Amino acid sequence: MAELIDLVLLAMLALTALRIIFLKDLFAVVMLFGIYSFLSALIFINLDAVDVAFTEASVGAGISTVLMLGTLALTGRKEKKNSHSSLLPLLVVTVTGAALIYGTLDMPPFGDPDNPVHQHVAPRYIEESPQEIGLPNMVTSVLASYRAFDTLGEVVVVFAAAIGVLALLGIRRKKDSDLESGLKEHKVLHVIAKIVIPHVILFALYVQFHGDFGPGGGFQAGVIAAAAFILYALVFGLPNTLAVASPKFLQWMASFGVLLYAGVGLVSMIKGGQFLDYNKLAADPIAGQHYGIIIIELGVGITVFAVMLSIFYAFSSQAERSNVQ
Amino acid sequence: MFEQHLAALPVLLPLIAAPITLILGRSLLSWGFATLVSGCAFVVSIQLLAAALSDGVLSYALGGWPPPWGIELRVDAVNAFVLLAVSAISTLVLIYSKDSIEKEVEKSKHSLFYTAHLLCLAGLSGILITGDAFNLFVFLEVSSLATYTLVSLASDRRCLTAAFRYLVMGTIGATFILIGVGLLYMKTGTLNMLDLASRIELYDSNRTINTGLAFIVVGIGIKMALFPLHMWLPPAYTHAPSAVTAFLSSTATKVAVYVMIRFIFTIFGIDHVFEKMGMDIILMALAVVAIFKCSYMATVQSNVKTVFAYSSVAQVGYMILGLSLVSVTGLMAGVLHVFNHALMKGALFMAVGAVFYRVGSVDIKAFNGLGRQMPLTMAAFTIAGLSIIGVPLTVGFVSKWYLVTGALEQDNWVVAALVLAASLLAVVYIGRILEAAYFKKLPDNVDPNTVKEAPPLMLAPMWVLVLANIYFGIDTSLTTEAASSAAEWLFPSGDTHSVSNVQEMSK
């Protein structure tokens, strides 16, 4: 049964991808990208990788779609005519695809428990992490403790993305309220948004702190919290949102999240361990692991939230400016 | 405590300093802080190189988890040597940036510039010292994103198209590397480099592993601008701010050369890559074409930054030529040239940036008569230019000497002759600019009083590099010792030793 579901989902994925290539209407393309992400998330669920599925759904289908729509507001929704010849790219893509298929010929059998990925490093993660780290969710154990340095690197990647967007677009301050943004006329939306937004934020906090026990963690929580603010900005207008969370404040938050994460590493260094060795954080190593993971996840959540919202500000303040002109 | 964490500091210092720089916000403050941190990273890298040369390998288990379960930082002679060059250039470029950036980047974006510079330094250092294949990819992303930002910060609007092109190509390269690492993981179940090496050995020409190798080599090829994947580089280096070009040309693509060396020599092993797959022939052919085609392209450009951008692609050709010889001397020449090229190109691009600072253009016509107006800048330019050509008593001569020796060891007269012939093309493109500077008159419409010597903070780092060009050209003991122990370390005799190490650890 699982194979059948996989096949159907993969076929839909391929159809969506082909449609994306041939469509000229970029708005529809962005929507299809969202569908593509949801389909991938379903495939991940079918593979029992719920953490990955959750991230794909919140980041790929959620915030990416909003940011791409923000870009379309600046660039227009029709694809321009391409004057380049498409022969060379077609050749490159064909060769790459052929190489990938060639690479699968000696691939280990799908889902076989004797595969190298299940036999070498993974057994320790599965067998010992409940004693060494004490978390029910092993994905979090690997992500936030065994390979915590990678995750720090990923947070820095997110931070670097914010630096890039701020350098390119910047967040333009509106001079006065010469523009009434938001959907002032839509009373129903106002009421619904007021009900939904607090719940979304509450859910974000749940996802943030429940990551140790089930799917979730800082990346997803940060994105969900940012989505709540973005919804507020869309319904009540950007100036009102800027009053709640100013761009300068978000810059501080983005930096603070990275520093909080790295700070845990520094504390464990001061206490005589290696960088990010949470065992040293408390007298009991398991308690130390818990403290470490909760704090670094918080750092992740703060940076991701601040960066996503900053990027949204950068796009939408540009769009408002071009609306005025 | 300091000693214990030495191996982690080169990446931790800039990584933690970057967000602090953003918070500091003010131009002068963030400049001072970034320079200070980069200087500390430089001091640490000197100590690391000394430790690596005397003790061999420094291993640092992050989070206290032993490899292959946790991530390992692993410093040996090879990466410590390249790290020294990267942190030195970063510090000098930051000193140089203060005046240069004042002119070329909007004031409100200065702290973003220094933050991005530190992120780039952290990414490059992370790539160099990590002993984990996936961690390498993560830091590759950090450095790449910072690099695109740095290129796009110039006031010239054309930098945006250049940065976008760079972003698209760079992302394809990074994705290829990720696909390759994924295929390796699928077959081995590990990401630690030494562990990967010992487990790849178990497979005899496996199609999944070979595909992984192909994806990784092409991906790194894009990142290092290996001919014919170099098309993103000339526009990016031409339109980026001068300080950024000086930094990137001497570090970013060279770190990619290191990654190529690491994957071929440490992970896949030379038997597999060169003898079974025959990649030495492919790399040698690409390197020779790169050297000639791009040196020729450099002779016909009118924008001096483009001249040296093409020259950089040609110089990458020399490095790849060195490692395609598959000998200790050849590899040593390659590693040595990574270091030496940083000294020459750093100085050259700083001199070009100084000209832009005073004249406002880097067209070759803008150099007319500058020999009199900016004597110190042009003297620095001349010496660094001679080094690119490979004149004796400069570092350029040293690397070419070992490259030719490596070729002659194998009685490969053709390659030796080609290396020498390509130097003549370098004479042409350096000569054109020197002719303009020393034998042509300042144009009448330029007031001789406005075009004067560059400010001291730009001259000082430039001249430090020029003097290093001469010093390491005369006293070659330090650089050749480091490069030769690096090369010996990478060759199989050193390899078996390290593999047995990991097996002990995993028990």
Image (cartoon, helix red, strand yellow):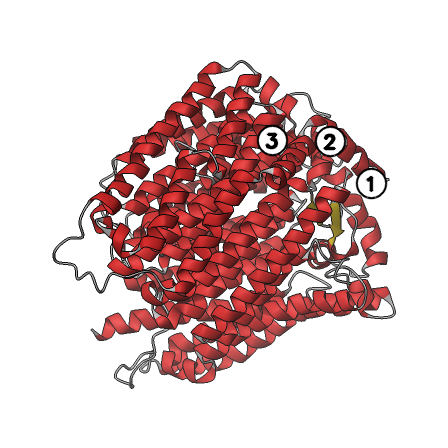
How far across and how far down the image is residue B357, in percent?
Answer: 30, 60
Inspect the image, locate mark 3, and give the three-letter code of the amino acid beneath it: Ile
Q: Can residue B447 be seen in this view?
A: yes
Image x and y of residue A60, in percent: 49, 56
- Residue A165 located left or right of residue B189: left
Disc 2: CA contacts within 10 A as few (<14), some (14-19) or many (>=20): some
Q: Circle 3 sits on which residue?
A: B264
Inter-mark Cα distance, 2 to 3: 14 Å
Nearest the eye: A225 or B318 = B318
Q: Residues within 10 Å of mark 1 (few under 14, many from 20)?
A: few
Residue A224 visible in the current orientation: no
- Could you say which quadrant of the image residue B423 lies in? top left
> Looking at numbered disc 1 in the image, what kind of residue is underneath it?
Ser
Can you say which quadrant of the picture contains the C terminus of chain B?
top right
Label 2 sits on residue: B494
Residue at disc 1, secondary structure: helix
**Residue B506 — which label?**
1
Chain letter of disc 3?
Answer: B
Q: Which of marks 2 and 3 is nearer the N terminus?
A: 3
Q: What secondary structure is marked by label 3?
A: helix
Both labels 2 and 1 in a single chain: yes
